[in-house]
Amino acid sequence: MARVTASAPRYDVVGIGNALVDVIAHVDDDFLTRHELVKGAMTLVETDRALELHRALPTAIEMSGGSAANTVCGVASMGGSAAYVGKVSADDLGGVFDHDLRAVGVRFARAAQHADVPTGRCIIAVTDDAERTMNTYLGASSLLAPNDIDAEVVAAGAVLYMEGYLFDRDDAKAAFRRAASIAHDAGRLVSLTLSDSFCVDRHREDFVGLVADEVDVLFGNADEICSLYEVDDLDTAVAAVRADCAMAAITVGARGALVATADGLVEVPATPVPKVVDTTGAGDLFAAGFLFGLTHGHDPVGCARLGAIAAGEIISHVGPRPLVELRTLI
């Protein structure tokens, strides 16, 4: 694992990802059937499909989102310092996204804007079992390119955190490689979240190469880790990931999380929650707590416990951002 240089980092975590605005609504299973949605999946959609689904939703909550953006906001809520690199359009939603990050104290290293491509948005349908089905219009967020990476900001973060959802264009893959190189050259850690098993299926070869070459800390759930290595058995996948990177944090649903390092494997239970309302953002906030712990001297078990606390707060309400300051829970 890379070691932080003598130069003190300005930020605990610098995130790179799809800058999106979330549109969240509670629906029944019939809604998924009528609109031919795959329950629990993240599906990329074009403009017309996004507008169709948006119009069909019942009353919805709209808020800035995006997986890595949720994570850096979680880091700030824990009491850490964070920055974010992403691309929005010069439209109202772009302004909302910018404002929301700054409002919680996150530095937004805003990439060059596109006047003719709208800001991306994610339509999230939440069913009664707390499962979320996402249809994502990437818009301007997907146009992130290597030249959009703010090298000064990336080098100033103790940990670089990269979002797998952004991997759907070659320019974005090149941007990830450039950012990882900048971070390692500065003596920082590089982390990656696999984001979604469907995402892993689309980009397995690129992900495997990135994990082996650049990633110090890998985040994913059991399905994503198994998909990455094309195995059905989690133990086999864990053995493979331990050979590829220094640390992997693997969420296993209501059981909690596994942390795999060269020293072995530990399991940390989930934080009890009276009622699970919405799992949107659970993985994002687990990563936030974990990375906060990692940048503040905690061991792997302590990092996972902080991740569990953050995830427990998120699944107790609708939306992927904390409703209370997470620092008050720890």
Image (cartoon, rainbow, N blue to C red):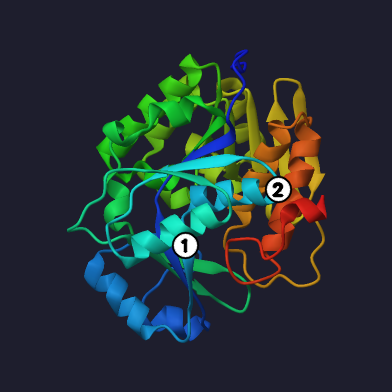
Q: Is residue 185 left or right of residue 4?
A: left
- Which residue is at a point 32% across and 43% down the rendered structure image? 111
- The percent position of residue 219, horizontal first and vertical second, equals 58, 40
Task: Please identify the quarter of the rendering in which residue 115 is found.
Answer: bottom left
Amino acid type at mark 1: Ser
Q: Residue at x 48, y 80 (%)?
A: 60
Q: Residues within 10 Å of mark 1 (few under 14, many from 20)?
A: many
User: Could you give the CA–CA distance between mark 1 and mark 2, rounded to whole angstroms?
Assistant: 19 Å
Task: Give the structural element (helix, strand or loop) at label 2.
Answer: helix
Amino acid type assigned to the residue bearing label 2 in the image: Met
**Mark 1 touches mark 2? (CB < 8 Å):** no
Would you name the residue on which mark 2 appears?
78
Mark found first going from the N terminus, 1 or 2: 1
Image side of residue 163 versus residue 48, left or right: right
Residue 173 in percent (x, y) is at 33, 34
Q: Nearer the viewer, residue 288 or 325?
A: 325
Residue placed most toward the observer, 203 or 105: 105
Where is 25 relative to 67, above or below?
below
> Residue 169 location in percent, x, y?
27, 42
Helix, strand or loop for disc 1? strand
Instruction: Give the quadrant of residue 98.
Output: bottom left
Question: Is residue 252 shown to the viewer in this render?
Answer: yes
Q: Position of residue 34 (x, y in %)?
A: 38, 84
Q: Is residue 189 above or below residue 43?
A: above
Q: Residue at x 39, y 50 (%)?
A: 18
Residue drawn at the location 71% of the way across and 53% of the way down: 310
Question: Where on the picture, by quarter, is residue 91?
Answer: bottom left
Disc 1 marks which residue?
A: 64
